[in-house]
Image (cartoon, rainbow, N blue to C red):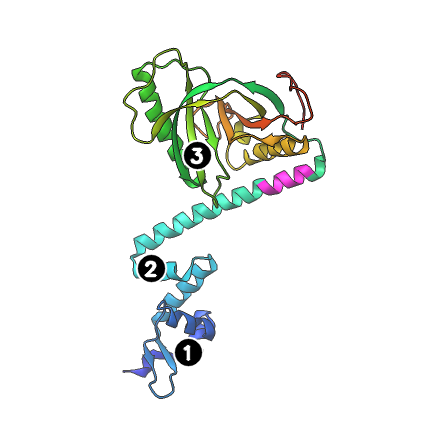
Amino acid sequence: MDRRNLLPIGQFSQASGLSVTALRHYDASGVLVPAFVDPVSGYRYFRRDQVRTAQSIRALRQLDIPVEEVRRLLGGGEEELAAALQEHLRAAERRLEVQRSVVHSLLSRLTEGAEMTHRVTVRQGAAERILVRGATLDNSGLDAFLRNAYQEMYEVAGRGPLTFTGPAFVRFHGVCDDENETLVEACLPFWEDGAQPTDLPEGMSVRELPESTLACTQVEGAAAAFPQILGAYDAVAGWITEHGFAFAGPARMVYRRWTGTPDHPDNRLEIAWPIDEPADDGPLPSNRLIVA
């Protein structure tokens, strides 16, 4: 082997910007294997053209891409690597937008104190018969799921045709964001004494929801888009806990007005959370209004 084309590990470390310890680790993990290892001393040597690969590894690791994923990406072609980097950038931008929203929400709480920006009201929700399609997912798959689910449900409703008794809504059985999956149900309420759905596709069902008391707030325009809408959930949840109520079911996102574009200024959504009344109080009037 022509050692004139090889760099000892110390020089290769300086050229690549990777420490000797990191180079040994990447050798052991199969990400960057030396071109030659001295059988007597065990000293590692790298080809000069491996410097660019090492620099790429350093850059990918600076993006917090796991070592195993780095190895897979470097083993693929340039198109696969470019596509992965574009997706990583989109994910980073989504995380940054969430962080901006969280920071603005915290700053708003600090500057406004108890005067929250969301007005929380209490209303009575009637018993409903609903068409339901559910899936377990995180926020990255939410928009596509809801679009497909409602398209299928409106097709089923049109065959009845069903008589709608209220706006479509979504039930969240837990936290649904970029880090957490939960059961999400797209719901479409219809008149129980009218036409009924038939030939339901797999995964779609009819369910009965009981009458409920709901703590609610409404958001419009940009405030109705993710991640800004998370502040509305926090406001309602905070109001429920501060006023001594119990959570009595999954949170609902009700489409009061929807254009089909998530950040459209004409959108208006309602966050409605079923609650149980305090045990030591009488019935809660349906027209009671409390501002959080």
Q: Which residues are magenta?
A: 102-109
Secondary structure under the numbered disc 2 in the rendered image: helix
Q: Nearer the viewer, mark 1 or mark 2?
A: 2
Q: Nearer the viewer, mark 2 or mark 3?
A: 3
Q: Is residue 108 magenta?
A: yes
Majority secondary structure in the magenta region: helix
Q: What's the mark number on residue 111?
A: none
Would you call the spot at circle 3 few (<14 residues within 10 Å), some (14-19), or many (20 or more)?
A: many
Q: Residue furthest front?
A: 280
The x, y position of residue 7, in whole percent, is 38, 79
* Front residue (pair 226, 81): 226
User: Sequence-wise, which precedes: disc 1 or disc 3?
Assistant: 1
Would residue 51 be found to the left or right of residue 287 on screen? left
Q: Quadrant of the N terminus?
A: bottom left
Residue at the image position 66 percent from the left and 27 percent from the top: 279
Where, by quadrant of the figure, is residue 248 drawn? top right
Q: Quadrant of the C terminus?
A: top right
Residue that mark 3 sits on: 184
User: Sequence-wise, which precedes: disc 1 or disc 2?
Assistant: 1
Q: Is residue 262 magenta?
A: no
Distance in Å between CA atoms under marks 1 and 3? 53 Å
Where, by quadrant of the figure, is residue 101 drawn? top right
Residue that mark 1 sits on: 9
* Front residue (pair 282, 203): 282
User: Sequence-wise, which precedes: disc 2 or disc 3?
Assistant: 2
Distance in Å between CA atoms under marks 1 and 2? 24 Å
Distance in Å between CA atoms under marks 2 and 3? 33 Å
Would you call the spot at circle 1 few (<14 residues within 10 Å), some (14-19), or many (20 or more)?
A: some
Where, by quadrant of the figure, is residue 245 drawn? top right
Three-letter residue code for mark 3: Val
Q: Is residue 27 above or below residue 189?
A: below
